[in-house]
Image (cartoon, helix red, strand yellow):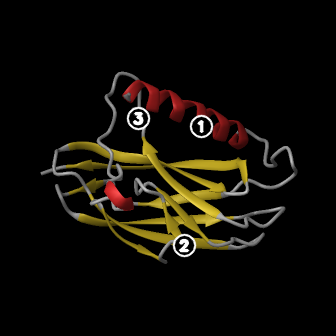
Amino acid sequence: MRTCVAACFAALLALTSCAAGGEELTSSGKGYPRPTIEFPAVTAPGSEQKAVLTIENPGPGDIPVLLVTFVMAAPASPGQGFPVPIVNGGPGGKDPNVVSIDPEPDAVDARGVNYRFGALPEGETTSITFTLRVPKEAGPAGNAITVSDGSEVERARGVRLQTNVEG
């Protein structure tokens, strides 16, 4: 299962990496979102930390439905193991490690890893703050986050959320 998830993530990362490699427009002529993340590099076990996800829509084209998806992160470098996921889903769309989200999403999937927000007009930037509970186990923890246009799957970019749990 982990191998399958890693392979799917690698394919998604390859898709989004191609976009970052110089191509700034999708095949339909729309611009890719530009996500960045602020998160502490080192955290205490079980602590609550704010992850501020900032998304710019450089255009052309509005993003009518903004999707934010947390997936398992690949190892940071060859030979390392997978980081422990911070956001890993839960029953009824409630991940126990997602303490709060500001602003509240319009919808959350049944596993609690896909979040839908409203439109992001061309030229606008938005910030979403996820208050996350980091794992209690020492070592690397994190997720890959994909930001996409819900109306055009090709229009996606990813960013890495990672911390080192010490203590």
Q: Earlier in the sequence, mark 2 or mark 1?
A: 1
Tag 1's secondary structure?
helix
Residue denoted by label 2: 106
| 53 with respect to 66 (left or right) | left
Q: Is mark 3 in CB contact (under 8 Å) with mark 1?
A: no
Please provide percent x and percent y for residue 125: 65, 72
The residue that appears at 32% across and 39% down in the rendered structure is 83
Tag 2's secondary structure?
loop
Q: Amino acid at mark 1?
A: Leu
Q: Residues within 10 Å of mark 1 (few under 14, many from 20)?
A: some
Please provide percent x and percent y for residue 154: 72, 45
Q: Is mark 2 in CB contact (under 8 Å) with mark 1?
A: no
| 121 with respect to 40 (left or right) | right
Distance (Cα) linking label 3 and label 1: 16 Å
Q: Amino acid at mark 2?
A: Asp
Distance (Cα) linking label 2 and label 1: 24 Å
Q: Residue furthest top?
A: 79
The residue that appears at 71% across and 64% down in the rendered structure is 57
Nearer the observer: mark 2 or 3; the answer is: 2
Q: Is residue 90 above or below residue 101?
A: above
The residue that appears at 45% across and 27% down in the rendered structure is 4
Q: Is residue 97 above or below residue 103?
A: above
Please provide percent x and percent y for residue 78: 41, 23
Nearer the observer: mark 3 or 1; the answer is: 1
Tag 3's secondary structure?
loop
Residue denoted by label 1: 12
Q: Earlier in the sequence, mark 2 or mark 3?
A: 3
Q: Amino acid at mark 3?
A: Ala
Please provide percent x and percent y for residue 13: 58, 37
Q: Is residue 119 above or below residue 46?
A: below
Residue denoted by label 3: 76
The residue that appears at 47% across and 76% down in the rendered structure is 104
